[in-house]
């Protein structure tokens, strides 16, 4: 497995010049301790309701502003963190899906941060955050059947050499690169704007790595910070 190294296109600096993210690559093993992941997810749901960070809501709102910069309507297609937290505040919890998915959802909920989790072996080329021209291919599901879409021209997307892996920055993930129970090699991206203090971005990353080590004690994990500009 080649550890994925994401690229941030220069066009992103015009939309969110202070965007920064933590990239985590995992060369994993068989997942253990599934009950642990479900417990961490439950605890994160409680924390978002009872002991939220003072900057959390401002960070969610900043993502809404960023989405508006490229023509998205965050009330209809919110960032992934906003969608998760809305469900938690409404229902009190979200259901367990899969140990790895539970962990990155827990980090997203606790820290009010969009977190993407991808099957690294399904990638072709580097993950790239860029602005779509509208011709790119996005594989999804409609009415239970495989379907193909194209992003809007000007939409912020994650993509690789084959096509779009996530539409509207972090709104909807494609099918091809999703993590499932057989995935062993993974790539995660924790995406933040300046309303989230940088120290907390690093804290979120360290907490996620700690949880992943519980699930996969022999995993090889690497992390790097990536930015829309050269500023840290």
Image (cartoon, grey):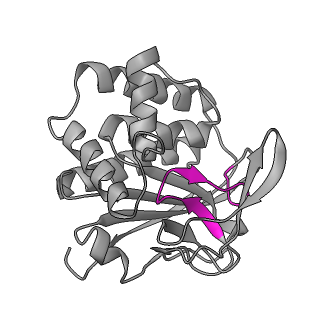
In magenta stretch: residue 169: yes
Residue 168 vs 2, above or below: the answer is above
Q: Is residue 165 above or below residue 36?
A: below
Quarter of the figure that contains the N terminus: bottom right
103 above or below 170? above
**Quadrant housing residue 186:** bottom right
Tell me: 180 left or right of 96.
Answer: right
* Outermost right residue: 145
In percent of width and height, residue 34 lies at 62, 31
Residue at the limit of the structure toward the top, as seen here: 91
Magenta range is 164-179
- Number of marks in the rendered image: 0
Image quadrant where one finds the C terminus: bottom left
| Residue 92 in view in this figure | no
Between residues 122 and 1, which one lies in front from this camera angle? 122
Is 231 or 17 nearer to us in this picture?
17
Please, what is the dominant secondary structure of the magenta stretch? loop
- Horizontal and vertical percent position of residue 196: 21, 51
Is residue 166 something one can see in this rendering? yes
| Residue sitting at x 59%, y 48% | 216
Q: Residue at x 36, y 45 (%)?
A: 207
Q: In which quadrant of the rendered view does residue 120 lie?
A: bottom right
The percent position of residue 27, horizontal first and vertical second, equals: 60, 63
Tell me the residue at 59%/65% (across/down): 151
On the image, the x and y values in percent for residue 225 come to 33, 70
- In the image, residue 12 sits, relative to residue 179, either above or below, namely below
């Amino acid at each position: 497995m080649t550890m994925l190294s994401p690229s941030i296109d220069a066009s992103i600096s015009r939309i969110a010049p202070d965007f920064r993210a933590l990239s985590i690559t995992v060369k994993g093993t068989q997942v253990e301790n599934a009950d642990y992941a479900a417990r961490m997810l439950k605890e994160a749901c409680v924390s978002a309701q009872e002991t939220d960070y003072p900057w959390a809501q401002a960070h969610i709102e900043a993502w809404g502003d960023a989405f508006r910069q490229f023509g998205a309507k965050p009330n209809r297609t919110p960032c992934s963190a906003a969608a998760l937290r809305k469900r938690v505040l409404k229902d009190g919890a979200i259901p367990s899906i899969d140990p790895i998915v539970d962990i990155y959802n827990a980090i997203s909920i606790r820290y009010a941060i969009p977190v993407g989790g991808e099957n690294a072996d399904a990638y072709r080329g580097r993950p790239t955050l860029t602005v779509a021209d509208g011709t790119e291919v996005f594989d999804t599901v409609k009415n239970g059947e495989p379907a193909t879409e194209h992003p809007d021209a000007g939409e912020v997307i994650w993509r690789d050499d084959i096509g779009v892996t996530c539409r509207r920055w972090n709104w909807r993930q494609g099918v091809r690169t999703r993590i499932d129970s057989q995935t062993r090699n993974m790539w995660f991206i924790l995406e933040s704007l300046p309303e989230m203090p940088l120290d907390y971005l690093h804290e979120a990353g360290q907490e996620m790595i700690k949880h992943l080590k519980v699930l996969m004690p022999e995993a090889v994990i690497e992390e790097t910070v990536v930015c829309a500009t050269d500023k840290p």
